[in-house]
Image (cartoon, rainbow, N blue to C red):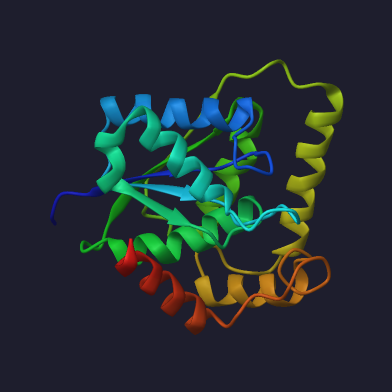
Amino acid sequence: MGRQQKFTVVLANLMSRSGRLNGESMERVDLAITLDEIRPAQNIILCGWAYRPDSDLPIAEALKLYVTERRPDLLPKLVCQTMSRDTVGDAFFSRILIEKLCDKPTSSLDVVTSDYHVARTAEIFRYVFPGHVPINVSGSSCKSPDLGCLASEERSLRAFRHTFDGVAPGDLFSIHERLAFAHPFYNGDVYPSINTIESIIQSLSLSHSKA
């Protein structure tokens, strides 16, 4: 079996209308840069859609700008994944993109988020990715989360488990079906419905080829 290819996936937090990242997003990117110095990745996947109603800029592109201002040498590694709207989407769309980028049957993942978000992120990514893929989740240090933040994390984790109850881990097509019909961020209840999985695969392939 050939050498594993490693990818780093960076989850965004928030940004301003102009695309200036908030402190939490900057800390996540800074940690990803540090990790790449220790464990270099084939590609660094930057996640996040154009979530602000007053801006067409995907936060993934804002992450890319922040990286290139500090480490322009990393530009060839950067790939923006601009479809995800939450942590489940970060995992789902990143898996599709990585499988397009990876020319070997196995890969390993470093996922970067904030410290309070590590446990939920780890459970979600290990659910979405095939079981044989090693996944390490690292969290940037932020101010001690308040009780409301911790309660929100617990509610979100319960909602994730409820939404995907009965869907086999790693079954990409079934996960897409559950997103499209039961997840309010992707089924049209809150934001526009996602496309078919075939269209998503094609779109991510095209976005990579233009990068």
Quarter of the image with the N terminus is bottom left
Image position of 161 (left or right of 10): right
Image position of 79 (left or right of 200): left
- Which residue occupies 21% across, 61% down? 104
Q: Position of residue 59 (x, y in %)?
A: 58, 48
Q: Nearer the viewer, residue 71 or 55?
A: 55
Image position of 88 (left or right of 78): right
Spot the residue most to the right. 148
Q: Position of residue 66 (x, y in %)?
A: 46, 35
Spot the residue most to the top. 143
Q: Position of residue 94 (x, y in %)?
A: 46, 58
* Above or below, 200 relative to 69: below
Q: Position of residue 118 (x, y in %)?
A: 59, 34
Residue 129, visible in the rendered structure: no
Image position of 129 (left or right of 102): right
* Above or below, 47 relative to 104: above
